[in-house]
Image (cartoon, rainbow, N blue to C red):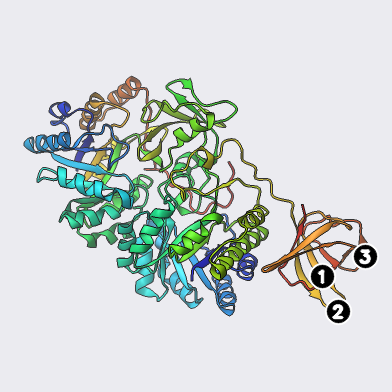
């Protein structure tokens, strides 16, 4: 099971390389919710540098594709592709057509965020000759292990980080301030939190970028303690460091190598965040009889 | 010919939708369907619904659009075969496995649900290659993008024209899962996007205490875009709202039907205000055109302005009419009194009158129609029909 980490500074590759198996980077023209957006030259540099250390390099392309943007995707892939690029992580199945056209469908990793929740649908994508797919963040550890025990291609999953739970194309922060008739000073700012009015103890990080508006889970999801169970089911685990820099990545990666209670606690204290296990042990309710809010 | 597609939460609503002008109706079965709170149909109900639709030359689609977990796939083939036996005209699905299973084990055509958030031509082609007959587009497209997709598409394209909207890309939202443990993609959405929130930058409150931050959008209403959508060769125009009342279904379906018919007949719409006034009678919710004119702005969002009080305009529904005595039998829905001016509305007419007297079933004279669902008799000097609506005139 390989550990792939998102990147904040190119220079940090040297610091992180001994603790991970590769990097996941992107550009905001085709990606969203990035730890940092890199330009084409930087991405090429990251891919080459990763390869020189025998590390893998994945390119994030997780914006939802609209026809008018397709040429950006194609131009971007043409510009960054090289043998040093291991794969392209796409959230929209329409990107497969672009990769196919470029003879690169075997580098596609499909990450439809919420949609791959069962073994049957995972198997369906096998016939497209893609490199792999991400499992949804909303399924149990038991389901992950069950799906992974007979996987048709490489399986990926997020194992640590602030995970999004809402992706709107709307510029919701902009619209809110437009309604208030005041300028929006918060576009692409990473210090926003939305707090439930009726349950103010629940706070969620928010981000408005060019792709839209994103709301993240209250706590950091961390499957750090379940590597042993996952190692035979999942090929790649992603440590997403959005809202942090590479020192955080280093701390978390070290913790992966030696997941003890004190280092977990120390990182959470230092970065003022709480870690939880998401839906690993929590089944969401199917067909509720009565809904009250 | 562009299809008008309406929702129905039960058999009565299905019949109303068809009688008021829908070309097709979509419903949820008791398995594999979102909208867990809608009164979903048994297979027997589905059979009856399909029979009613087909007798009227219309179609019936059944949603099987959950994003299933491993354990939800049990009995899928049997269920799909049951739908085939019930003669449904298509299923609406989001899971590739459900799509594939339907195509392999039945002859039911498959429509790809908006839960897949298809907003580009490549994705439409992907689902076409898989065997889908139709793709329901995501709501995040403007009219030019929709036109560009229909021009390239080799399958039918369906577009939402009216009703509630997800603020997120549909299918990509798990606010409900995370905030309430209810699975948005398996019928449990708690509509957390419609809650009020305070917005902070670091520890500083930047939203207004009187106008909290909200992700919620106004409901979709696209009357002014219908001619463009029809000209763009959109195959099906979809109204959302399986949980809505019969009055809502009748009013919304009727309004779009009349507009579409006028545009088909004359290639123009003489008085758009008429249609806008009519559709406002369906419900007291603020509406907007969503993404159809481009990226939504503040005008398309809801900020502490929600008003979901039902309209009081729906007074009753006609159950029967005796042309000899001229008495209409009416099931009451809202308060009305003798001497009140009311309006009877059918699929293709609306006519005002003043109520002289109101009687109960035993012909006892009443001073008011007070009780919901009470059966009443009212003299009506013109012919009315079962399922016509009695409305207040404002």
Mark 1 surroundings within 10 Å by alpha-carbon count, few (fewer than 14), some (14 through 19), many (20 or more)? many
Are the residues tagged 1 and 3 within 8 Å (C-beta)? Answer: no
Q: Between A74 and A116, which is closer to the camera in this rendering?
A: A74
Q: In the rendering, at what x and y percent does residue A124 appear?
A: 29, 61
Which residue corresponds to mark 2? B324
Q: What's the CA distance linking mark 2 and mark 3?
A: 20 Å
Q: Residue at x 36, y 59 (%)?
A: B149
Instruction: Name the chain under label 3.
Output: B
Q: Between B216 and A210, which is closer to the camera in this rendering?
A: A210
Q: In the rendering, at what x and y percent does residue B135 appear?
A: 40, 62
Circles 2 and 3 on the same subunit? yes
In this picture, is B352 found above or below B301?
A: below
Quick one: label 1 or label 3, which is nearer the N terminus? 1
Which residue corresponds to mark 1? B328
Residue A58 is at least partly visible in this image = yes
Circles 1 and 3 on the same subunit? yes
Which residue corresponds to mark 3? B364
- Name the image quarter holding the N terminus of chain A: top left
Q: What's the CA distance linking mark 1 and mark 3?
A: 15 Å
Quick one: label 2 or label 3, which is nearer the N terminus? 2
Classify residue A105 by image quadrant: bottom left
Q: Residue at x 16, y 33 (%)?
A: A42
Q: In the rendering, at what x and y percent does residue B45 appear?
A: 58, 71
Q: In the rendering, at what x and y percent does residue B312 appear?
A: 74, 51
Mark 3 surroundings within 10 Å by alpha-carbon count, few (fewer than 14), some (14 through 19), many (20 or more)? few
Q: Secondary structure at mark 3?
A: loop
Residue A151 is at least partly visible in this image = no
């Amino acid at each position: 099971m390989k550990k792939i980490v998102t990147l904040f500074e190119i220079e940090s590759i040297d610091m992180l390389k001994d603790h991970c198996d590769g990097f996941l980077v992107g550009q905001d023209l085709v990606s969203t919710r990035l730890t940092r957006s890199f330009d084409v030259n930087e991405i090429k540099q990251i891919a080459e540098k990763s390869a020189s250390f025998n590390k893998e390099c994945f390119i994030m392309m997780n914006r939802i594709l609209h026809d008018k943007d397709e040429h950006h995707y194609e131009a971007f892939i043409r510009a960054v592709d090289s043998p040093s690029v291991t794969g392209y992580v796409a959230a929209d199945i329409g990107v497969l057509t672009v990769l196919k056209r470029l003879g690169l469908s075997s580098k596609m990793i499909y990450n439809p965020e919420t949609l791959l929740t069962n073994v049957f649908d995972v198997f369906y994508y096998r016939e497209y000759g893609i490199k792999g797919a991400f499992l949804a963040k909303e399924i149990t550890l038991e389901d992950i292990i069950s799906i992974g025990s007979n996987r048709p291609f490489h399986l990926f999953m997020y194992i640590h980080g602030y995970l999004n739970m809402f992706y709107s194309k709307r510029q919701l922060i902009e619209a809110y301030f437009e309604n208030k008739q005041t300028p929006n000073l918060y576009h692409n700012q990473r210090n926003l939190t939305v707090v439930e009015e009726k349950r103010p103890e629940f706070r969620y990080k928010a981000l408005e970028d060019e792709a839209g508006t994103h709301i993240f889970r209250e706590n950091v999801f961390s499957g750090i303690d379940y590597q042993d169970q996952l190692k035979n089911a999942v090929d790649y685990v992603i440590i997403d460091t959005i809202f942090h820099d590479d020192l955080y990545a280093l701390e978390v990666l070290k913790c992966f190598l030696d997941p003890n209670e004190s280092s977990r606690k120390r990182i959470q204290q230092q970065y003022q965040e709480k870690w939880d296990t998401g839906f690993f042990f929590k089944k969401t309710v199917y067909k509720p009889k009565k809904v009250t809010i | 010919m562009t299809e008008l597609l309406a929702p129905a939460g039960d058999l009565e609503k299905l019949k109303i939708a068809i009688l008021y002008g829908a070309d097709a109706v979509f419903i949820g079965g008791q398995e594999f369907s979102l909208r867990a709170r809608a009164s979903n149909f048994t297979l027997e109900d589905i059979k009856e619904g399909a029979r009613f639709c087909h007798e009227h030359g219309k179609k019936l689609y059944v949603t099987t659009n959950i994003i299933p977990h491993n354990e939800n796939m049990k009995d899928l083939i049997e269920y799909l075969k049951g739908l085939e036996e019930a003669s449904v005209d298509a299923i609406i699905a989001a899971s590739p496995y459900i799509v594939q299973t339907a195509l392999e084990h039945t002859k039911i055509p498959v429509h790809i649900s908006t839960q897949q958030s298809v907003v580009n031509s490549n994705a439409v082609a992907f689902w076409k290659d898989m065997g889908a007959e139709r793709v329901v587009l995501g709501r995040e497209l403007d009219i030019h993008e929709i036109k560009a997709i229909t021009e390239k598409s080799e399958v039918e394209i369906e577009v939402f024209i009216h009703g509630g909207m997800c603020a997120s890309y549909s299918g990509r939202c798990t606010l409900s899962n995370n905030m309430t443990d209810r699975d948005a993609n398996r019928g449990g959405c708690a509509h957390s996007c419609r809650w009020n929130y305070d917005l902070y930058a670091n520890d500083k409150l930047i939203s207004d205490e009187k106008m909290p931050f909200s992700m919620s959008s106004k409901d979709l209403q696209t009357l002014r875009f219908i001619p463009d959508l029809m000209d763009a060769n959109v195959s099906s125009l979809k109204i959302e709202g399986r949980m809505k009342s019969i009055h809502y279904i009748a009013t919304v379906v009727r309004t779009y039907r009349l507009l579409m018919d006028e545009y088909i007949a004359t290639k123009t719409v003489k008085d758009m205000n008429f249609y806008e006034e009519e559709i406002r009678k369906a419900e007291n919710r603020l509406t907007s055109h969503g993404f159809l004119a481009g990226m939504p702005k503040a005008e398309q969002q809801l900020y502490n302005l929600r008003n979901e009080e039902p309209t009081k305009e729906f007074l009753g529904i006609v159950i029967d009419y005796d042309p000899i005595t001229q008495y209409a039998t009416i099931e009451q829905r809202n308060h009305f009194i003798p001497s009140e001016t009311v309006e009877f509305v059918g699929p293709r007419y609306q006519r005002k009158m003043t109520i002289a007297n109101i009687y109960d079933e035993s012909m006892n004279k009443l001073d008011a129609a007070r009780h919901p669902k009470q059966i009443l008799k009212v003299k009506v000097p013109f012919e009315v029909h079962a399922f016509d609506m009695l409305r207040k005139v404002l």
